[in-house]
Amino acid sequence: MGLFDFVAKQFIDVIHWTEPGDGILAYRFPMSGMEIQNGASLTVRESQLALFVDEGKVADLFQPGRYTLTTQTLPVLTYLKNWDKLFESPFKSDVYFFSTRLQLDRKWGTPNPITIRDKEFGIVRLRAFGIYSYRVTDPKKFYTEVSGTREIYTVEDLDGQLRNTLIGSMTDLFAESGVPFLDMAANQDEFGSRLKEKMLPVFDRYGLALDSLVVQNVSLPEELQKVLDQRIGMNMVGDLGKYTQYQTANAIPVAAANEGGMAGAGVGLGAGIAMGQAMAGAMNQAPAAPAAQTPEDIPALLEKLHGLVAKGILSQDEFDAKKAELLKKLV
């Protein structure tokens, strides 16, 4: 090697990484054209882990602290390179730093409603969303399963995989539990705990630890929510027949107070009776049969009908027709 080549050759004697911002999970220390000296210094800060990878093979893992790189501190790399026979210095090896900080406020949600079978409603579509947090705990798994040889691997690179896996697990959870939608929606904390438990092995496979998972909302699409609101309203009303009777009783004084009263609205006595019968039928109640009329009752009834004519509730023609019908009963 010539003098120029010797001068141009670069050696690394300090290896460390300071995170430039949030969201980086893995970072490969720049090694192009450089070699690590025997006795070089490695600094791993709190909330970091460092991993040496030799020719694609995972080697030594370093916890937070400061290290001097020798055969004693690099036992796996020493074995892979056969340094027990002859230590080579300088040497080349890829060094990856991993952030072990909590990755907070990662959002998940159903982009479209998912279809499930519900005990109470049958086939329904629902939406759900929330947040979760996690951290890297096993750099070897994360390197081999996820990040690989990429120079930088971020949370955004992983979000889609985790989010879609989470939504799939949520769908399975509904199917397996058999818990009705209303119970799930009313107990979102419990739902979140069960979903987190189901997701723990998935995160562990990637070398991650799921720290928290929160279900912020479980709901139906707008058109189904309207149907549910109507059902809730019916349950609150209770006895529909009594409710309709109550509403009718309140409406009569209001109608009578309007100008013209019932007659002004074009409602005669016969129409009023028909309306009452129709309402009774809607409430699954048969209209009450009129009491049998005796000759002694007819004069009193005529007097009442005449009073209705004076109040404008009954027309003269209606009174005359009813009068003729009643008088025939006296014969």
Image: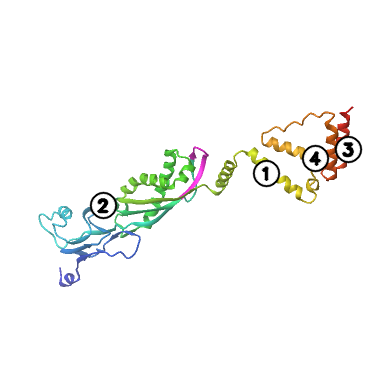
Q: How many marks?
A: 4
Label 3 – label 2 distance at C-alpha: 102 Å
The amino acid at mark 2 is Lys
Left or right for 50, reference 119: left
Residue identifier under label 4: 269
- Quadrant, the N terminus: bottom left
- Circle number at residue 23: none
**Mark 2: secondary structure:** helix
Tell me which numbered mark, 2 or 4, is placed earlier along the sequence. Answer: 2
Closer to the chain start, of discs 4 and 3, is: 4
Q: Measure the alpha-carbon separation of dots 2 and 1.
A: 72 Å
Residue 139 image point, x, y percent: 27, 53
State the CA–CA distance, disc 2 to disc 4. 89 Å
Q: Can the viewer see residue 109?
A: no
Q: Is residue 295 above or below residue 38?
A: above
Write down the quadrant of residue 100 in the picture: bottom left
Mark 4 and mark 3 residues within 8 Å of each other at the beta carbon: no
Question: Residue tagged by mark 3?
Answer: 320
Tell me the amino acid under the disc marked 3. Answer: Asp
- Residue at 83% across / 39% down in the picture? 304
Q: Which residues are magenta?
A: 117-128
Q: Which residue is mark 1?
A: 247
The quarter of the picture where the C terminus appears is top right
Depth check: give the residue in front, 324 or 47: 324
Report the side of 63 relative to 132 (left or right): left
User: Is residue 43 placed above or below 174 in the rendered structure?
Assistant: below
Q: CA distance from mark 1 to mark 3?
A: 33 Å
CB of mark 1 within 8 Å of CB of mark 3? no
Which secondary structure lies at badge 3? helix
Q: Earlier in the sequence, mark 2 or mark 1?
A: 2
Task: Of the two numbered discs 1 and 4 on the same chain, state the one appearing first in sequence.
Answer: 1
> What residue would you read off at disc 2?
140
